[in-house]
Amino acid sequence: MKTIIEQDTTEGLESLIGETVTIFCALYFYTGKLIGVSSTCVKLQDPYIVYETGSFTENAWKDAQKMPHKYWYISMGMIESFGIMK
């Protein structure tokens, strides 16, 4: 039998709640304030879709467009990587 001994929320998506994150998905990149994480999706506030990154060392995206909604949900199954970037 497998049991959970300890839950560590200092790692992974949950540790980034409240931060502006960039999420690399199978088709697109998204950025916004991470306000929710569940087993099926994440919730971004004030989301942008990033069409062109430009140099990763720059402070701004070359082409990031504001989405016309206050919130956007991303399926966990589509996420390839994530973190705080710009």
Image (tube, rainbow, N blue to C red):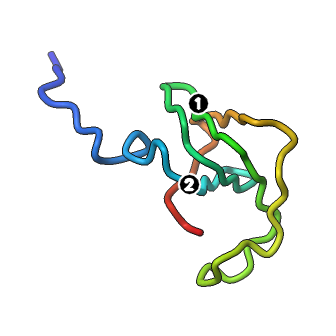
Q: In whole angstroms, how far apart are the C-alphas of marks 1 and 2? A: 14 Å
Residue visible at 57% across and 51% down? 80
Residue furthest top in the image: 1
Query: What label does residue 21 carry, if any?
Result: 2
Instruction: Tell me if residue 3 comes above or below residue 52 in the rendering.
Output: above
Q: Amino acid at mark 2?
A: Val
Q: Residue at point 87% right, 41% down?
A: 68
Q: Quadrant of residue 51?
A: bottom right
Three-letter amino acid code at the position of disc 1: Cys
Residue located 69% across and 52% down the image: 30
Judge left or right: residue 83 versus residue 33: left
Q: Indicate which disc, 1 or 2, sits on the residue closer to the N terminus.
A: 2
Quadrant of residue 52 in the image?
Answer: bottom right
The quadrant of the image that shows the N terminus is top left
Q: Position of residue 53 (x, y in %)?
A: 73, 72
What mark, if any, has residue 41 been given in the picture? Answer: 1
Identified at 82% across, 52% down, the residue is: 66
> Viewer-nearest of labels 1 and 2?
2
As helix, strand or loop, the secondary structure at mark 1 comes to: strand
Q: Quadrant of the C terminus?
A: bottom right
Q: Do the residues under discs 1 and 2 have CB atoms within 8 angstroms?
A: no
